[in-house]
Image (spheres, rainbow, N blue to C red):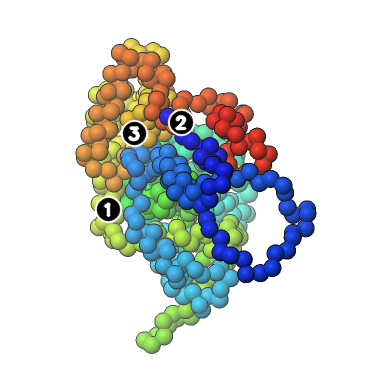
Amino acid sequence: MTESLLCELSVPGRKGVLFPKSDVPKASLPANLTRQRLPLPEVSEVDVVRYFTRLSQLNYCIDKGMYPLGSCTMKYNPKINEETARLSGFANIHPLQPVETIQGCMVLMYELQEMLKEIGGFAGVTLQPAAGAQGELTGVLIIRAYHQSRNDLKRTKILIPDSAHGTNPATSAMSGLEVVQLPSDANGNVDLNELRTHCDDTLAGLMLTNPNTLGLFEENVLEVIRMVHEAGGLVYGDGANMNALLGIVRPGDLGIDVLHYNLHKTFSTPHGGGGPGSGPVGVAAMLVDFMPGPVVDIIEEGDDEIPPLFGFVMPEKSIGRVKSFWGHFGMMVRAYTYIRVHGPEGLRSVSEHAVLNANYLMAQMKKIYHLPYDRTCMHEFVVEGRWDDAPDIHALDIAKRMMDYNLHPPTNYFPLIVHEALMVEPTETESKQTLDAFIEVMEKIADEAHNNPEILKTAPHTTPVGRLDEVKAAKELVLCCGLEFPPRERLLPDKCST
Ligand SMILES: *Cc1c(COP(=O)(O)O)cnc(C)c1O
């Protein structure tokens, strides 16, 4: 299937707009502002509408179908979130407006901070970070600042299990700490013996993704946290996987000192496609003063007649700002809406269904795909995309073939500790019918892998673009088609279709 380009639809003289008759005298523009030729496509309104509508439908998205991309929690984003985010009092404000004029927004931010404190079991929350990874950096900087404030300067080492998300070592290294990798044991837990050897007075902390990227709950979590605390270190919790824990476990109660949330995963704000994210950070009591600011607080108590006045406050020993203005406010409105719509019982049921859906899929999948860590999973699980009796087939071939069946592929080749990993996260928003349809496709693909491997090796067959050479695509990037003005040659179809 090849799509026409807008320039191919061009017919000389065809117009999409009618300008009103000029009611001012004609004047000429300075020559250096004009050009002789402006080869824009000449098309009608209906051509343009159909062209862009078709283009928009070439992309796969959560509103089209299941999106089992492990680690990303691609749940359905309820449309009511969009309605509230578009309310004029939220959408049409200016970040430099005096706080007295945006008290409604301040209340929303304050209450969101309070709700996230309650959900995670923390004493303070900052809404500033723009994404999960930035929340991690913020959290690690808070850990550093804490040790430095106690003049405990030897603590430069941070431990990260090999089942952690890739952003953990990246953000730790950015913060200037020395990253030490911890191996997992045969059950997918942190290897306690290995951990013990690092528990000394150079330990700044440990970053724990729980559930980890195998989708498994850390069975020794209390012991891990106790060991790190006893050595004087702090524990960072990667809360991107909170979708498994809402209303069931509060990381703060386990002893986790700092944690980031992903509003664009757990709390249903859109992600992907370059949209803004939001990665608020929760901290235990002794870290509240180090949070980046400003945070929202009550600056004048109210009484029976006058409501309290909310303002922005800088925590006393703050690590400073990590984001311009107040963070991504539109995401906060969406997450706030989601939390209020569900309430405490509803949030718990979100996580229960996310875990149930993942275990339902895992139980079916392990009949056909090898499951290296075979125990009850949380909100996601990881299988191997390979069989000994189909030696040419790799996880990538399976992922590509899924696209022919109108499914988004799962995360593949991650986590690194599973060969040919396929990481599946169905989320709670998929019905049993959709999950059954997914299993049916995965069975068909397993059958094809053994009896018609070529169809997997050459997949996808039904998408606008076939199998890409990903190395070449990265090294010899061709960004063309339409959006740039001349030279005209760049708009010609034969160039554009490469
Ligand atoms: C997604 C994710 C992150 C990073 O979050 P971003 O918002 O993409 O920066 C960190 N840790 C885990 C476990 C994740 O799934």
Q: Which residue position holds label 1?
A: 348
C-alpha distance separating marks 3 and 1 = 31 Å
Residue 229 position in % (x across, y down): 46, 48
Dot 3, crowdedness within 10 Å: few (<14), some or many (≥20)?
some
Identify the secondary structure beneath mark 3: loop
For residue 205, say whether it is visible. yes
Disc on the earlier residue, 3 or 1: 1
Q: Quadrant of the N terminus?
A: top left
Determine contact: label 3, label 1, CB under 8 Å: no
Q: Is residue 65 left or right of residue 28?
A: left
Above or below, comparing residue 10 to residue 325 in the picture = above
What amino acid is at disc 2? Thr
Residue 320 position in % (x across, y down): 61, 60
Dot 1, crowdedness within 10 Å: few (<14), some or many (≥20)?
some
Q: Nearer the viewer, residue 333 or 291?
A: 333
C-alpha distance separating marks 2 and 1 = 46 Å
What amino acid is at disc 1? Arg
C-alpha distance separating marks 2 and 3 = 18 Å
Disc on the earlier residue, 2 or 3: 2
Q: Which residue position holds label 3?
A: 406
What amino acid is at disc 3? Asn
Identify the secondary structure beneath mark 2: loop
